[in-house]
Structures are given as structure tokens and as C-alpha cells.
Amino acid sequence: MKDIMTNLPTFDDMLAAHDRIAPYIHRTPILTSSYLNELTGAELFFKCENFQKAGAFKVRGASNAVFGLSDEVAAKGVATHSSGNHALSLSYAAGRRGIPCHVVMPRTAPQAKKDAVRGYGGIITECEPSTSSREEVFARIHAETGADFVHPYNDPRVIAGQGTCSRELMEQTDGLDAVIAPIGGGGMISGTCLTMSHLAPEVAIYAAEPEQADDAYRSFKAGHIIADDAPVTIADGLKVPLKENTWHFVSNHVTDIFTASEEEIIAAMKLTWQRMKIIIEASCAVPLATIIKNPETFRGKRVGVIITGGNVDLDTLPWIN
Amino acid sequence: MKDIMTNLPTFDDMLAAHDRIAPYIHRTPILTSSYLNELTGAELFFKCENFQKAGAFKVRGASNAVFGLSDEVAAKGVATHSSGNHALSLSYAAGRRGIPCHVVMPRTAPQAKKDAVRGYGGIITECEPSTSSREEVFARIHAETGADFVHPYNDPRVIAGQGTCSRELMEQTDGLDAVIAPIGGGGMISGTCLTMSHLAPEVAIYAAEPEQADDAYRSFKAGHIIADDAPVTIADGLKVPLKENTWHFVSNHVTDIFTASEEEIIAAMKLTWQRMKIIIEASCAVPLATIIKNPETFRGKRVGVIITGGNVDLDTLPWIN
């Protein structure tokens, strides 16, 4: 495995990524809601990555990694350990290129997630639900297959790919004062920082995080990476910690990080479903929850809000029972 | 009350309606789904009126009625009897014009619906849950206020307004072979017939109806209006019968009417939520259910599918419990 983890992506990498992935992704629409504008006193522009291929923005970074490989490397496939949207997205992208995608997932992962990864053509190897088992099984799969490892967020190819989202957002809106996105490992926020710091450095970049998984918030305030110990939150895409590449962007370019409680997240999620008629994950309700909570920051501003994904288990909604 | 019920709207009425209502409605987007295209073998273009103002296409017809009134007539307000999207839409349009909107609703209507109508500024007068009480109370309100009666679907101003939806659909797509919409009282289908018979008479027009409220289907086959006796269906916007004006369009311009069972409707609704990430009412899942059920009719065709609304009670979903 080549050491790509310490290389930071450049703005040109983002531009190249956008050309590379254009045939495989949607240029997702911007939606607005006069109700939510009135409620928040801000003008909100929702970038709807819930309508993205595979249901999440992660297909941008995954496609950039997959389609940037030489034919020789690609022939051995790609691999990752993830049970979330990155696994779906990498499986989708690999399927489009016609190469194998190996996914190491805990055997305890929900059947629906396993089915979804397989639905996109991913090859699952199960591990025990522990970090040591995951690393051990992943190392074996990686060695056996020679597949290229695509980290869910710290990989510079992934960050460059995620940065294409805010490039579109800027093209689709007529000037913004701020952009806000949820933060977990920091891939989307890092891509946003990469793009915005070149295209529109005057635009404030905010990250939104669950109170119950506030490692990025605490890292940001402390000035160094702090990882949570097994956080529990409904926003299950946001449990992972920052890594060195994403910390670089967060520490250098993010204006502030806001947090929201579980109740606030669920209320913002339901409100978005009710008023905007779109299915969004709990993770992408965190930005709206923090906008509602911090009116002094957002009132009167034009704010881009990145809706990161829409892969929800419709059989168990957090406000029912 | 002037007798406007026997006048049919013209294509020019639809064009005038579009100019009149443009400031008050959204030009809603078209969404596509490669998954649903593969599933059905057709190319589907979903016209997303669930993103419309007040959450439903009915704001088109309601706005046309409200903004077409002279100042003198408008000063007395508008009135209707409806507990559904027409009441919301008429309240919204009246609010935009700054005139009263009187809504007669059964006292047994869900509190959420009453709250929603009041949220848009509608003035509710409750009646007993019977046709005789509704008619009696409505006649009294109508006489007392002198408000202009806007029928939910048989009113030619309403039909002309609904026709603006398929005009946009034609502008937003590059040619269609067919259009399909749900049918209840027939307002949307009539507007679609009005527009398509002038703009693109070669395009087939299909209506989709619940098996358990198949009065339009039976009327269409019999050649005269047959009204259901208190139909029970999850597609609660589709329980009302055709009237003379909508029957005119249905009997003259509709190619065929298809029906779907409750199970098929619920499955198509959930599938749309899952794959398209949009909130749609059960009523607007009926077209997709019938497309899935009648592949021989739709395979290989470019089909416009009108998603009529997204006002759903998120606390009681038909596939949970």
C-alpha cells in the first residue's frame, strides 16, 4: 500500500476530479424552503446530495478514487472497511468501472446494509465487531487481493472528490455568505474547505456535529485531534474521528463548529421531511438543527446547506416509538 | 353563486392561468431514477408537485381562481368544503392575496389537517361528518359571507390551473410518449387533457386509481359517471367522484385507466421514498404501482409521471405497524 495518506489534495486535484467523475454522478439540485427561511431568518440553499447516486455525496470521492486508478492497479480492485455510505459508494463506482470492490464489515452490521452493498456489487468479508478483528481481516483481504485501499475520508482522492460538491453549490447559487455541512471524519468539510478557500475565501465554513459525538468540536477548541470513545448518536454517519488530512483542513479553514442534541437533530430531520418533502438522514439534519439554534450567526445570511445523504431505514424512524 | 360549473375551460384559459399564477407557485423540478427506469423498462420523468407551494399541485388551480377574481368579488373572500390539499391550497392563495378563505370541515377531521389549514390562514367552520350537515353549513357560510365558491376540481378555473402542470412537464422534457396521473375527482387529469390535447395530442394520457375507489375506472368503462359509495383506501385524495366537467375531459381524452391494490400502492410509495428520497402521498404512488403492474403498456416508453403531493402524516406510515 503506497503512502498516500500524508499528501494533501490541491485545488487542481478537485478540478481534475470533477472532470473525471462527471459521467458517474448527478449534478444534484438546490432546493429552497420559504418556510425554513422564515423560521431561521436566513436564506437557505440546500444542496441535495440525498439525490446523488448511491444516495450520498460519498460517491464523489469514491468515484474519483476508482476512476483515477491505472488499468493495472484497477484490475486488482479496491477495498475498504465501512458499513455506511462509503461502502455503498465505492461498490457503485467499482461496479461502473467493472472492477471488484472488497468491503470488510462487522458480521453484526444490519442485514439491510449488507444487502445494499451487495446490491451495488460489493464483495463483503465479515469480521467480528471489534477494531482488532476489522484490522486483521482487512489486512488479510488487502494482502490477498492487492486491491487499492480507499479510506472513507482521509484519502486525498476522496477529499478532492467531495470538494466537487461545493464547486457545484457555488455555480448553482448567486453568492453565499456561509456554507455548513455535517462533520464526522471530516471528508465533506475538508473538500468544502479545499474548494471554498480557492473559489470564495470570504465565505464562512461551519461544521455541525452531534453533541453526543462532539470530537471534532472538542478537537477544534483544543487545537489537536481528540477522538471519541464509542460515541452513541442517531447521526450514525458522524461517529468517526478526524484524521491528519481532514484535521489539516478543519484546523486551517473552518470558521466554527456547532453542536446539536439528539432531540434537536430528530426535530430538524422530521421538519425537513415535513416541509421540504425530502428524505434525509439524521446526519444531514444536524446543520439545520444548529442553524435554528444559533440565529445570531445565520440571520440575514445566504447559507449553503449540504444535505449529505438519504439512506434511511424507513421501517424504524426515530420519531415513531 | 354564478353558475360556472357547466362552462369548460379552454386552452387559452390555461395559458392565462399560467401567467396569472406564476408569481405564487413553484416551477417544480423533474426527477428521474435509473433504478425505477430499470425496474419498469420505461423512462420515467417525475414532475414533483410534492415540492409545490402548500405541498400539492392543487395550489395551481386554487391560485388561478383566487387571483382571477375582481377586487370587488375578492373582497368577500373565497370558500370551499374540503379537508385535504385543496383547503390548504385555497387558504395559501387567499393569504397571498390578503382575502379571507372559509373552509367547512367535519369536526372529526384530523387535528393536523385543521392546524395546517389554519397555518395558511384559513378560517374553519366545523360541520358534522355527514353530507347533509356539510351542505347545510356550507350554504350558511356561503350566504353569510358572499364568498366565491371554489370547487376542488369541477371548477373550470381550477381545471385550467391544474393544466399548467403538464405544460411545464412538456417544456421540461424532450418529448414524451405518455403522461400518467392519479385520478380522484379528475381535476389534475382534466387539466392534463386540456393542455396535452392542444400541445401534444399524440401523447397517451393514463389515469391511475385505487382498486378500492375505482369509480373513475368503472365510469370510463361504462360510458357514464358512476359514484362510489364511501370508498376506503389509503389514497385518501382519490375518494371523490367525477363531476360533469371532469367527466367531459376523462371521457374524451383519456387513453385508459389502470387500478392498483392497497398493497401495490403502499409498496410503490415506500419504493419511491427509498429510491428517490422524496416524500410522496399514497395517492401519487398509484401511477407508479400501475406502471409496474402493466409493463406491456409502458416498456420502452418515455412517461411523464405526475407526483401530485407530499402532505403525509409522518407519525403513521402505512408500512409501520
Image (cartoon, coloured by chain):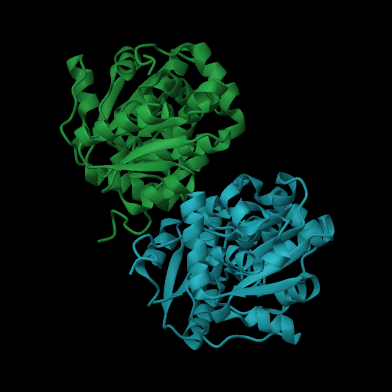
Chain colours: A cyan, B green
| Residue at 63%, 63% in the rendered image | A73
- Quadrant where the C terminus of chain B is found in the figure: bottom left
Task: Say which of B156 and B254 sits in front.
Answer: B156
Q: Position of residue B154 (x, y in %)?
A: 35, 22
Task: Say which of A250 and A34 sits in front.
Answer: A34
Q: Is residue B96 left or right of residue A166?
A: left
Q: Position of residue B299 (x, y in %)?
A: 37, 30
Q: Is residue A25 left or right of residue B85?
A: right
| Residue at 23%, 44% in the rendered image | B262
Q: Is residue A222 left or right of residue A83?
A: right
- Quadrant where the N terminus of chain B is found in the figure: top left
Q: Looking at the rendering, which quadrant does residue B132 occupy? A: top left
Q: Position of residue B288 (x, y in %)?
A: 35, 38
Asked whether the viewer can see residue B195, the reply is yes
| Residue at 35%, 46% in the rendered image | B269
| Residue at 52%, 40% in the rendered image | B53
Q: Position of residue A97 (x, y in %)?
A: 56, 52
